[in-house]
């Protein structure tokens, strides 16, 4: 009897002893299929991974060092710096499958943008968060069914935009950041969740996209701290994708210049976004006299208009060129002047910061804090009250300190 118990103990702990031995040897045994699955998910080659691992290394490693079941722990950590799965993910003996439910990368073959590694990381991050929040909603009996009607590209984007303004438009007279918050809140009221992320200056892999829509009800935005009006336009554009139920990952051009290569869906979403944000002021824009040098290219009218609606000067001038209210040559001149003025303001600000630093005046800059959708907050509240998650998990998901939990449970 004692021998049997000893045998069971040895069998039970054999893997642990082996892992300990490997740890002592600074190697770890993994399920190589899981790395191959992630390569397929991210659409990366083995050469891409090697390039990432070998950055800064004096002696580069080869594929024979990396793509095998026994690997150095340091190399596995380097690989996981791309995928952010945690080392336990690679120890799981279960064979992963490329399921459409797992990722948009398995649901679509092509995207509007040429995605950087940072973009792929963000897409995967929020795909996982979307799935997890959906599961929490179901476990806590929270109904997140679609409320808004489905549309198609056969529907007139102007008519759809004016119809939905009554339900979703935050209103004029708001500061642009407040406008964005209210817009996100109104979408939450209609079971559309918005994730906002911030690429800090020290983030190694940055996203080269502005936003994307993940079916059935998630929109993801990159914080455009120096151009919040562009972020608002991105949100309206992605709302268009939601209405069409057409997933996409976009590097959105808020200026929506006519482009023969742009597909019908992108054009519909651009038109929808414009009319949703401009509203009745579209009549004012359409009735403007042609912008020419003699009237300073209608600069006063356009500048005043940007104070009334959440569209930038360039976005308005782009509309003018589309309706032949400004020539392409003059449009290019105006656009260059706007960009030059923006660049000069940026350089002046940098010079002032440098001068302040030299004079001993240092301001502690803080990274922008992403806006939390009320829908996500509501989902986590419901999961907490139903006992699906505990206080620690609630705080972790909202990235808040435990002492602030009461204010987030109201």
Image (tube, rainbow, N blue to C red):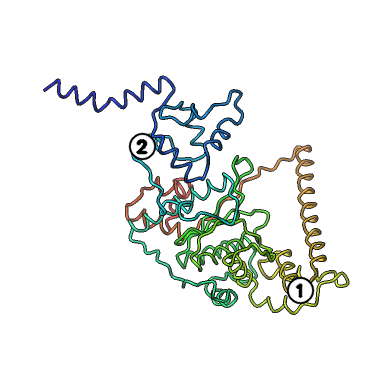
Question: Vertical placement of 372 versus 172: above or below?
Answer: above
Residue receiving disc 2: 92
Question: Vertical placement of 40 versus 154: above or below?
Answer: above
Residue 14, position in %: x, y?
28, 25
Residue 86, position in %: x, y?
44, 37
Question: Vertical placement of 268 versus 25: above or below?
Answer: below
> Which quadrant would the N terminus be assigned to in this image?
top left
Left or right of 311? Residue 125 is left
**Which type of secondary structure does the marked residue at label 2 adopt?**
loop
Residue receiving disc 1: 324
> Which quadrant would the C terminus be assigned to in this image?
bottom left
Q: Earlier in the sequence, mark 1 or mark 2?
A: 2
Q: Is residue 177 visible?
A: yes
Q: Residues within 10 Å of mark 2 (few under 14, many from 20)?
A: some
Residue in the picture at 66% in, 60% down: 253
Residue 184, position in %: x, y?
53, 62
Q: Nearer the viewer, residue 38 or 25?
A: 38
Left or right of 65? Residue 305 is right
Q: Residues within 10 Å of mark 1 (few under 14, many from 20)?
A: few
**Which type of secondary structure does the marked residue at label 1 adopt?**
loop
Q: How many marks?
A: 2
Give yes or no for contact between labels 1 and 2 (Cβ–Cβ under 8 Å).
no
Q: Residue furthest left?
A: 1
Residue in the picture at 40% in, 64% down: 144
Question: Vertical placement of 183 versus 25: above or below?
Answer: below
Residue in the picture at 53% in, 59% down: 248
Q: Nearer the viewer, residue 381 or 122?
A: 122
Q: Nearer the viewer, residue 180 or 19?
A: 19
Q: Nearer the viewer, residue 259 or 297?
A: 259
Left or right of 109? Residue 276 is right
Q: Is residue 374 visible?
A: no
């Amino acid at each position: 009897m004692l021998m049997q118990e000893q045998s069971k103990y040895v069998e039970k702990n054999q893997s642990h002893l082996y892992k300990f031995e490997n740890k002592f040897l600074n190697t770890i045994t993994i399920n190589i299929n899981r790395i191959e699955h992630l390569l397929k998910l991210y659409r990366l080659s083995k050469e891409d991974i090697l390039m990432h691992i070998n950055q800064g290394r004096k002696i580069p490693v080869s594929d024979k060092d990396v793509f095998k079941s026994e690997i150095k722990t340091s190399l596995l950590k380097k690989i996981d710096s791309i995928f952010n799965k945690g080392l336990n993910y690679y120890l799981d003996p279960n064979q992963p499958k490329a399921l459409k439910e797992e990722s948009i990368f398995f649901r679509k073959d092509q995207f509007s943008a040429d995605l950087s590694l940072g973009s792929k990381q963000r897409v995967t991050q929020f795909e996982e968060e979307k799935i997890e929040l959906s599961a929490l909603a179901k476990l806590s009996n929270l109904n997140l069914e679609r409320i808004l009607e489905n549309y198609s590209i056969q529907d007139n984007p102007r008519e759809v935009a004016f119809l939905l303004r009554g339900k979703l438009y935050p209103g004029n007279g708001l500061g642009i950041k407040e406008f964005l918050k209210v817009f996100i809140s109104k979408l939450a009221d209609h079971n559309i969740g918005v994730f906002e992320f911030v690429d800090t200056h020290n983030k190694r892999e940055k996203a080269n996209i502005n936003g994307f829509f993940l079916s059935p009800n998630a929109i993801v935005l990159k914080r455009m701290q120096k151009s919040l009006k562009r972020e608002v336009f991105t949100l309206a554009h992605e709302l268009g994708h939601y209405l069409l139920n057409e997933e996409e990952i976009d590097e959105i051009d808020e200026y929506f210049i006519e482009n023969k290569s742009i597909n019908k869906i992108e054009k519909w979403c651009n038109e929808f976004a414009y009319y949703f944000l401009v509203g009745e002021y579209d009549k004012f824009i359409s009735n403007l006299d042609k912008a020419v040098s003699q009237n300073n290219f209608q600069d006063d009218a356009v500048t005043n208009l940007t104070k009334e609606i959440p569209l930038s000067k360039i976005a308005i001038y782009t509309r003018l060129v589309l309706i032949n209210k400004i020539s392409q040559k003059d449009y290019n001149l105006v656009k260059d002047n706007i960009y030059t003025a923006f660049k000069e303001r940026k350089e002046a600000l940098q010079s002032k910061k440098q001068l302040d630093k030299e004079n001993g005046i240092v301001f502690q800059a803080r990274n922008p804090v992403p806006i939390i959708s009320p829908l996500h907050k509501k989902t986590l509240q419901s999961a907490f009250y139903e006992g699906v998650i505990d206080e620690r998990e609630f705080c972790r998901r909202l990235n808040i300190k435990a002492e602030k939990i009461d204010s987030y449970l109201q």
